[in-house]
Amino acid sequence: MTEERQALYFDLIDKLMTCPNGQEPQILEQQPELIDAGLVNTIVQVATIFTHEGNEDGAKFLIHVARELSKQLGLYPDVSNKE
């Protein structure tokens, strides 16, 4: 991953953190080229930093976003009961 792409990920994460509640899908739709496994990994890294800094709410929000993106990208296993 290039430093430039990492910077774009961080910028997108910052926009997600500061946007009004419920506007996250629109923020993500504005930069579909950044929606990939690298973004998910970067979000998890930032969430981990937030946890260590005591920002539990920010960390929980980012983990939620990472989980939803992972599902959309097919990176998250579907563990629902399909019987």
Image (spheres, rainbow, N blue to C red):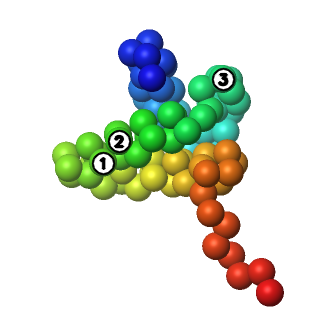
- Rendered location of residue 76, percent (x, y): 60, 57
Neighbor class of circle 2 (other Cα within 10 Å; few <14, some 14-19, many 20+) is: some
User: Who's the residue at 36% across and 50% down the image?
Assistant: 59
Give the SS element for disc 2.
helix
**Circles 2 and 1: CB distance less than 8 Å?**
yes
**In this rendering, does residue 76 appear at all?**
yes
Looking at the image, the residue that sits furthest to the bottom is 83
Left or right position of 20 against 78: left
**Quarter of image, res 24:** top right
- Can residue 11 be seen in the rendering of this structure? no
Q: Amino acid at mark 3?
A: Glu
Residue highlighted by disc 2: 45
Question: At 64% from the left edge and 73% from the top edge, which residue is drawn?
Answer: 79
Q: Secondary structure at mark 3?
A: helix
Q: Kindly identify the amino acid type of the residue bearing the numbered disc 2.
A: Gln
Q: Which residue is mark 3?
A: 33
The C terminus lies in quadrant: bottom right
Few, some or many C-alpha atoms within 10 Å of disc 1 (few <14, some 14-19, many ≥20)? some
Crowding near the residue tagged with mark 3, few <14, some 14–19, many ≥20 C-alpha atoms within 10 Å: few
Q: Is residue 34 left or right of residue 59?
A: right
Residue ID for mark 1: 48
Q: Which mark is residue 57?
A: none
**Residue found at x 35% / y 39%:** 46
> Which quadrant, please, contains the N terminus?
top left
- For the residue pair 1 and 31, the one nearer the viewer reads as 1
- x, y percent for residue 38: 50, 34
31 lies above or below 67: above
Q: Residue furthest front?
A: 1
How far, Cα to Cα, is label 3 from label 2?
A: 20 Å
Instruction: Residue 30: give x, y in percent of width and height.
Output: 68, 23
State the residue in front, 69 or 61: 69
Pick whichever, 57 or 80, lies toward us.
80
